[in-house]
Amino acid sequence: MISKMKGVFIALVLIFLYGPILILTAYSFTSATNIGAIQGFSMHNYVTLFTTPELRDMIIGTVILALGASAIATVLGTLGAIGAFYSKKRTNILISTVNQIPVINADVVTGFSICILLVVVLGIDKDTFVPLVAGQVTLLAPFVYLSVIPKLKQMDPSIYEAALDLGATPRTALWKIVFPQIASGVFSGFSLAVTLSLDDYFIATYTKPATFDTISTYVVNATKGAQTEIKTALWALSAVIFLIVVLIVVTANIRPGRRKEAV
Amino acid sequence: MRTFRFSRKNLSIPYVIFLAVFVVIPLFVLVYYAFTDRDGHVSLRNFIGFFTDPNTLGTLFYSIVIALTTTLVCLAIAYPTAYILAKSRVKRKSAMLLVFILPMWINFSLRITALKEILTVLEENIAYYPFLNAVIGMTYDFLPFMILPIYTTISRLDPSLIEAAKDLGANDVDAFFKITLPLSVPGIVSGVAMVFLPAMTNYVVLDMLYNSTYIMGSLIGSYFAAYNWNGGSLIALILLLLICVFTYLTRNLEDEDQRAGGGALL
């Protein structure tokens, strides 16, 4: 009885989480313009999605921004974590505390404050993409830092010392000994940064050039009265992204040895 | 002359400069703008205006109510889900967990679009139920962020504690309320931190659901649209203070490494 109730509860939660996105995916393959209307099979939305220059540019721009900002954030966050880890305790605590600010802070506040500093006070043109990239890196780097720190803590410090004793320069030892041991943290930090950047709306909306759109800003504007053509093409985009996320998550977890790390 | 020697701790210099410029200085700029007027004169007008205008105070109150409701609804769904998952005897529990948190990797604006289409079918005119839809939308968006930390905390609990409680005569209910629930508080606090604040500020979820009600985030949005940096800065500052208070109150309760949890899963 109780296990049946548990099953029903879990099923309801799954329906809540997946129902909308699955229904939308199903409808993306029809010529319907509203959910509920029954129409025949059609790939029209997918053709629109991949052939409309506006949509294509927006998707490519979002991906380039996500990869670029995440790469910068990964370098900064990783170096910051290594440096902070080997600093005096007081410096370490100070860096870690400031690092927490963008993590805990509301994205609206982070985006707004970056916009005020760079655009209003310093007068940097949004069209240069500097405010957008700087804003996103500010959001992402702290998460990379947080992904790397636990790996540094797990490391056996004597291996580094041994490398120095055997004649390695600190630079070589860092690259050959420390880096391989924290690489999985750096990678998961980068992955997290990419997903956060792809999901970001607030930093982008306060700092982006007027003519540039990320998926989030585009979709939000589109819901405020775009043509039906674009609206249903975005259903196709949801379906594609849903599929990509499922594929990535499945392949990332099939690899042996990663499973334990996952939780 | 001293030459620059490579040292591991110097690696943090670029990041320290970056944090100073893009995290610390913007906070000071916010404070400056919040307490000056359009001409740059020091002024408490924004401040007094916010706390005497019934509209802005109403917005503050309304966002707290929305955020509290959303947090409680998320908790009511997430805790049993996380508990059932963590205690289930399924072999690949981590795979099961992934099913529940996978939605957080799908762009939120696309997910809310999907939800909007469904709500439109169910309710006909979604503008009629602003409060209900705000809570549904936020819950839909933030639920995975509540499930993840609670699951992590419960699955880390030492099962021998429950066994010991039972050996000492506790039944399942006693063991849950005296052992499992108190020990899962760190996970709950992490989850609450990840839901409560976004629920006060993520006004786009409301906008996308054709919701005409205002939360704190919406105020920043509308000041921004009106180029009123001073008004927006004050709201941002008030939000920051709320965050500081919350963080201070829960500083000893939260699990340290929870925040980066999402990345470790990928």
Image (spheres, rainbow, N blue to C red):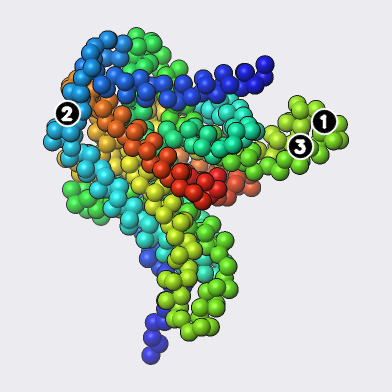
User: In the rendered structure, are the residues bearing label 1 and label 2 in contact, judged by CB atoms less than 8 Å apart?
Assistant: no
Label total for image? 3
Task: Give the mark nearest the N terminus, 3 or 1.
Answer: 3
User: In the rendered structure, are the residues bearing label 3 and label 1 in contact, judged by CB atoms less than 8 Å apart?
Assistant: no
Q: Position of residue A159 (x, y in %)?
A: 55, 73
Helix, strand or loop under label 1:
loop
Helix, strand or loop under label 2:
helix
User: In the rendered structure, are the residues bearing label 3 and label 2 in contact, judged by CB atoms less than 8 Å apart?
Assistant: no
Tag 2: residue type? Val
Q: How would you rate the neighbour count of disc 2 (Cα within 10 Å): few for under 14, some for 14-19, many for 20 or more?
A: few
Please state which of residues A232 and A22 is positioned toward the viewer in this rendering. A22
- Numbered mark located on residue B162 in the image: 3
- Numbered mark located on residue A232 in the image: none
Q: Chain of mark 1?
A: B
Q: Position of residue B175 (x, y in %)?
A: 76, 32
The residue located at (43%, 57%) in the rendering is: A186
Q: Are marks 3 and 1 on the same chain?
A: yes
Picture quadrant of residue B184:
top right
The vertical placement of A125 against B47, above or below, is below
Please state which of residues A156 and A247 is positioned toward the viewer in this rendering. A247
- Numbered mark located on residue A47 in the image: 2
The residue located at (50%, 80%) in the rendering is: A164
Q: Chain of mark 2?
A: A
The residue located at (42%, 76%) in the rendering is: A172
Tag 3: residue type? Ile
The residue beneath circle 1 is B170
Q: Is residue B84 visible?
A: yes
Q: How would you rate the neighbour count of disc 3 (Cα within 10 Å): few for under 14, some for 14-19, many for 20 or more?
A: many
